[in-house]
Image: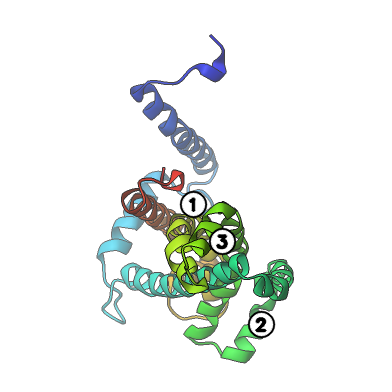
Amino acid sequence: MRLINQKPGRVLALFLAILPFLAVLLAYKMGSDARLAVNPSDKLLPAISTIVDTAERLFTQPDRRSGRILLWHDTAISLQRLALGTGIAALGGLAFGLAIGLLPHARSTLSGFVSVASMVPPLAILPILFIVFGLGETSKVMLIVIGIMPFLIRDLSQRVLDIPHEQIIKAQTLGASTGVIALRVALPQLMPNLIQSVRLSLGPAWLFLIAAEAIASDLGLGYRIFLVRRYLAMDVILTYVIWITLLAFVIDWALKQTARKAFPWSGEAL
């Protein structure tokens, strides 16, 4: 039997899924042990036990100055910024995607502009955002919006164009207006694609959020990482990195389950 036709069983599939994580953990432990054997005070690769102890402290002990558990407070602030930026970008991407995909005049006007705008590196215009919107919450949210909305628009507009033209013709034959076609024909088919596109945009969204918080913020996960880097506190940095990765995974899983339950008929939900 060819390898292309062989499928692992449930137990083997679980083992294969865990295997890369175990390999990374083993490689880190070997590197950490080697460095600590040479220099027990080495901070670059702290022992796994040190990271665990640091994580326990960060998750449970309040800050002496503010009385708050900073990791939880930073998480709440960052998730609020991420949700707001991603939500605005998703709504904008949906609206413009429908317009460009359905309306030839909108497509002629906006498709070229969106294509060019999607090529602009968002981090390159971060200083402009700080100048225009200040150093508050608006600039951080706008960086996420500007960073991911052009991709969402291009992807969703293409998904609208991929809708079989026969469906549009049949709806018009039955007397449907442009608005009805958008709401009753295009939108239901576009919603699972919207969730899939947002899932693909979460990585860049986190990148833009961390960058904005690192440059101009006094709260948030990105701010805390760049604050402690000057002390070479790798145990704190790694704890925050692992926590951000876990948050991103949970959000992606939640969106996937939402798509699977809300749109079981769609292949995008699988």
- Residue placed most toward the observer, 235 or 147: 147
Residues at discs 2 and 1 in contact (Cβ within 8 Å): no
Amino acid type indicated by mark 3: Leu
- Residue placed most toward the observer, 77 or 70: 77
Which residue does the numbered mark 2 point to in the structure image?
Answer: 127
Task: Write the residue at 29% across / 62% down.
Answer: 59
**Mark 3 / mark 1, whichever is N-terminal:** 1
Q: Crowding at label 3, few (<14), some or many (≥20) Cα neighbours within 10 Å?
A: many
Residue 99, given in percent of the width and then of the height, sits at: 58, 71
Disc 3 from disc 1: Cα separation: 52 Å
Give the SS element for disc 2. helix
Q: Nearer the viewer, mark 3 or mark 1?
A: 3
Task: State left or right for residue 78 relative to residue 62.
Answer: right
**Mark 2 / mark 1, whichever is N-terminal:** 1
Residues at discs 3 and 2 in contact (Cβ within 8 Å): no
Amino acid type indicated by mark 2: Pro
Residue 175, given in percent of the width and then of the height, sits at: 47, 68
Give the SS element for disc 1. loop
Give the SS element for disc 3. helix
Q: Nearer the viewer, mark 3 or mark 2?
A: 3
Which residue does the numbered mark 3 point to in the structure image?
Answer: 156
Amino acid type indicated by mark 1: Ser
* Residue 233 visible (yes or no): no
Task: Write the residue at 70% across / 69% down.
Answer: 111
Which label is found at residue 41?
1
Say above or below: 66 vs 99: below
Residue 64, given in percent of the width and then of the height, sits at: 29, 77
**Mark 3 / mark 2, whichever is N-terminal:** 2
